[in-house]
């Protein structure tokens, strides 16, 4: 889940979610990466959270190519990577990536990005990576599955409305939303990759009050946009008054070309 709703990439939100992201990612997929990874292209890099998590788990030397549409986020990412890692930046939309861009790249990564793409864009990305023969590690793609304890009679309707909102059409593009992990796995399988998928759920609750409250506001807010008939204001007030324990479903996808 990105933010108050998918697609909020403010540095404040990205910093708030970084510890939950780090705890959720499937570490065993990193251990399955082929050979030595020296050059990594991070798509939709944001402030560089994935790079800060992954780079200490790879060998050295390393060079990261941070890729994003937002120059301010690119500057933040470039300045915040660990010592010993070289960084370059490129302002580029993932939909414009080509196999030539991946020359010399060992690994393509992203985090919490695929849900904002379309079916066509993910299949194109798979084709580009297949042409370049580059492995991919896509982390924290939202699945739409949310479990809250204690439960509330409105939970299921809020979840369904949020998921419908994530599949909305934006500027003529039908977003994948919670269909992203399955779509990515299918796309990379079809172009010949060996694909491994792992669950990577967020675990939120009273121990993480700021993140849990902000996630609730965004989750319920998006649901209210989709279903204004729901009593979402009362529901949100109940949930904020006594923060629940929450599991927010994500999946990580590893694709390797033999």
Image (cartoon, grey):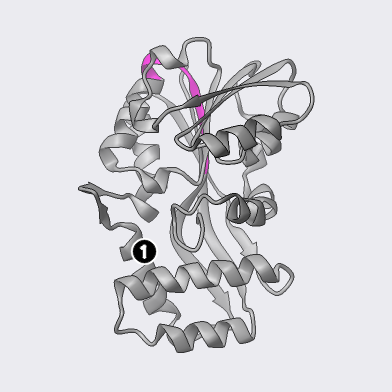
Q: Examine the structure image and report whether residue 254 is included in the region drawn in magenta.
A: no
Q: Quadrant of residue 158?
A: bottom left
Q: What percent of the width, then of the height, locates residue 74?
A: 56, 33
Q: Please indicate whether residue 108 sits to the left or right of residue 27 in the image.
A: left
Q: Residue sitting at 35 percent across and 59 percent down?
A: 166
Q: What percent of the width, then of the height, locates residue 155?
A: 45, 79
Instruction: Check the image and report above or below for 106 versus 68.
Output: above
Q: Examine the structure image and report whether residue 138 is included in the region drawn in magenta.
A: yes
Q: Residue sitting at 75 percent across and 17 percent down?
A: 60
Q: Nearer the viewer, residue 54 or 89?
A: 89
Q: Please indicate whether residue 166 sits to the left or right of residue 235 in the image.
A: left
Label 1, secondary structure: give it. Answer: helix
Q: Report if residue 9 is visible in the image.
A: yes
Q: What percent of the width, then of the height, locates residue 169?
A: 24, 54
Give the extent of the magenta segment: 130-139
Q: Report if residue 160 is visible in the image.
A: no
Q: Mark 1 highlights which residue?
A: 163
Q: Nearer the viewer, residue 68 or 19?
A: 68
Instruction: Check the image and report above or below for 192 versus 28.
Output: above
- Assess disc 1: are there few (<14), some (14-19) or many (≥20) residues with their C-alpha within 10 Å of its C-alpha: many
Instruction: Check the image and report above or below for 121 versus 153.
Output: above
Q: Quadrant of residue 130?
A: top left
Q: What percent of the width, then of the height, locates residue 237?
A: 54, 86
Instruction: Check the image and report above or below for 195 versus 183.
Output: above
Q: Residue sitting at 45 percent across and 61 percent down?
A: 5
Q: Nearer the viewer, residue 185 or 222?
A: 222
Q: Nearer the viewer, residue 158 or 10?
A: 10
């Amino acid at each position: 889940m990105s933010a108050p709703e998918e697609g909020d990439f403010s540095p404040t939100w990205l910093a708030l979610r970084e510890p939950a992201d780090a705890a959720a990612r499937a570490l065993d997929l990193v251990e399955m990466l082929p050979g030595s990874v020296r050059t990594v292209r991070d798509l939709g890099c944001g402030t560089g959270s994935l790079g800060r998590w992954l780079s200490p788990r790879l060998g050295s030397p390393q060079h990261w190519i941070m890729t994003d549409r937002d120059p301010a986020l690119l500057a933040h990412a470039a300045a915040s990577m660990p010592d010993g890692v070289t960084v370059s930046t490129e302002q580029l939309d993932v939909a414009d990536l080509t196999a030539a861009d991946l020359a010399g790249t060992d690994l393509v990564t992203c985090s919490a990005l695929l849900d904002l793409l379309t079916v066509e864009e993910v299949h194109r990305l798979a084709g580009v990576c297949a042409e370049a023969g580059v492995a991919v590690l896509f982390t924290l793609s939202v699945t739409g599955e949310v479990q809250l304890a204690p439960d509330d009679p409105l939970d299921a309707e809020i979840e369904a409305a949020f998921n419908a909102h994530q599949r909305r059409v934006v500027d003529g593009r039908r977003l994948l939303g919670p269909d992203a992990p399955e779509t990515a796995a299918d796309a990379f399988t079809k172009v010949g990759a060996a694909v491994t998928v792992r669950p990577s759920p967020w675990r939120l609750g009273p121990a993480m009050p700021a993140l849990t409250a902000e996630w609730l506001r965004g989750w319920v807010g998006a649901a209210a946009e989709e279903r204004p008939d729901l009593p979402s204001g009362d529901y949100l007030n109940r949930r904020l008054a006594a923060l629940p324990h929450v599991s927010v479903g994500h999946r990580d996808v590893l694709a390797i070309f033999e």
